[in-house]
Structures are given as C-alpha cells and as structure tokens.
Image: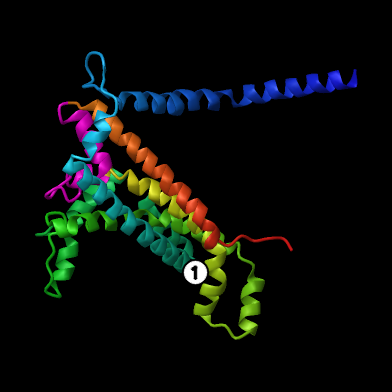
Amino acid sequence: MVNGLASRKKRAALITGLVMISPWLVNMLLMIVYPTLYNLGIGMTHYSGMGTPKWIGFDNYTFMFKDKLYGKSLYNTIYYTLLAVPIGVCTAMLLALAMNRKLKEIALYRAILALPSVLPLFALALVFMWVMNPRYGILNIMLGLAGIHVDWLGDPRWAKFSLVLLSQLGAGQYGLIFLAAMRGISPDLYDAASIDGANGIQKFWRITFPMMTPIILYDVIVGVGFGLQVFMQAYIMTQGGPANATMFNALYIYNNAFRYGSSIGYAAAMSNVLFFINVVVAVVIFKTSKYWVYEETNG
C-alpha cells in the first residue's frame, strides 16, 4: 500500500514537472529539433525553394570539395575566429581590470565601456564604416598624423582584420562578467600573496588569472560560436569583398540560399557542415579545458 502510494506520488510529480516545462519542450521541438532534422534532409537534395526537393544523396557535400569559394569562405571564417576570440578575451580582461579600479567615477566608466555591447550590431557596423572611411574616417585622420594610410575595408589585406576590430566593441559585456568573477575572488588570497612579497603582476598570474579560467572558458565557447557564424558585419559593410576577403561561411550560405539562384539544398548542406564544425570545436575545447581551467575543490 505504501509503495503504491509512493509510486502514485512520483507519477504525479513527474506529470506536474512535464506540464511545467512543456512550453520549453514544445519550443525546443518546434524551433530546434525539427528545423535541424529538416535541414539535414534538405541538405541531401537539390532544392531551389520552389517545387519538390530532388534527392541527390551526398552530391552537395562532395561538391564542397570542388567549390573554391566555399574553401575560401571557410578559411576566412577560421581566420576571423582565431583572431577575434583571443583578442576579445584579452580585451575583456583588460576592461575588467580597468573597471575594477577604485575611482569615484568608476560607475560612469563602466557604463561607457559596456554601452557598445548593448547597441544594435547594424548600427555599430554603420558607424564603423564611417570611422574606417579611407578619405574622411577619423581613424585614418589620426593615423595620417604619423604618415600612415590604410584602406581598411577596401584592401583585402586589412578587410578581415577590420571586422575583427569591430567585434571588440562587444567586449564590454564580457568585461562586466569578468569583473563579477574578479569581485568573487577572496581578498585573503591577495593578502597572503602580499605577505609572501608578490607584486601586482605575480598576483595576476598566480591568483587572478587561474581563478578566472572558468569564466574565460565560457567566453571562449561563446566567442567561437559567434565567430564561426559571423555574418551581419560582412553583409552590411563589405558584402563579402574586396576580392572575397570577407566572404565568411555564413554569408556564403546566405548567398547560395537567397542570391545564387536559390541553391537552398547546397546552402543547407554547408550549414550542416558548419554546425558539425561548431560541435566538434566545442567538444575539443571542453575536453582540453581540464588542462588549463582551475577547478576549486573542497579539501
């Protein structure tokens, strides 16, 4: 009797729990699981968006090996990610250190540093186009004082790096996260280090940085995800140019789906590969994090 009553309570609790999370379950199934499975199927077809998809098996995937522009877009994406993510982590760390200073106006400085990260990306891109204008942009005016002139968005050698610089405007958001993590480090650790004669740099590398590695891991994972899917900056500022220097993978997928004769099947196949790359990179980062992420244990 007691066992039967306990089992009924467990079933009731399970049903109640499922009802409570049902909006999330429905959203996940309709907005994530179904589109992902559908995209996998479309990637195996020739489909222009009109009529019935024609099954072609793995032809879309084999064509990727022959598509030089696809290889270029993948290279551009990896180049951007490998630059933007480490620079972004360093920038966020420097901003956090700056915002951690004990100054009367520090609240105002924090708001100013975090402001670009809450502004719409398309607005930042338009402003950045003006800043980097080769003729009247403020950046080139400042560099011109030293006799330097750079065609930031018109020169293939600088175009990708220009978008990397733009991505750093969002570092203030992660700087605030880093700041919160810094504030959570026990002052006793710094006091003990001071007694041992450690200077500021030694305190950073021996205490601050190791204690911050879990947050750095979070920043790296999120940054890699956004880096591999970079799209809007190139779409607004360069349209993939000059000479396909900023033709990122997501932009090339978009062009194939909606501009190059609506090759939706091929675009779906490329997006599946990009998803697979994203998953593999995230797994590798998580697996290797045990070698550099500090895990506090209760002794």
* The N terminus lies in quadrant: top right
**Region of the chain picked out in magenta, as a range:** 233-261
Residue found 15% across the figure and 64% down from its top: 140
Direction from residue 52 to residue 141 in the image, left or right:
left
Q: Is residue 229 above or below residue 80?
A: above
Query: Which of 201 and 76 lies nearest the eye of the viewer?
Result: 76
Q: Residue 70: in sight, yes or no?
A: yes
Query: Percent position (x, y) of residue 272?
Result: 34, 34
Task: Residue 91: say if magenta.
Answer: no
Query: Percent position (x, y) of residue 222?
Result: 43, 49
Task: Residue 235: say if magenta.
Answer: yes
- Name the residue tied to disc 1: 104
Q: Is residue 194 above or below residue 56?
A: below
Query: Which of 91 and 108 lies nearest the eye of the viewer?
Result: 91
Query: Percent position (x, y) of residue 49?
Result: 23, 20
Local secondary structure at mark 1: loop
Q: Is residue 252 above or below residue 175?
A: above
Query: Which of 265 and 148 lies nearest the eye of the viewer?
Result: 265
Residue found 51% across the figure and 73% down from its top: 205
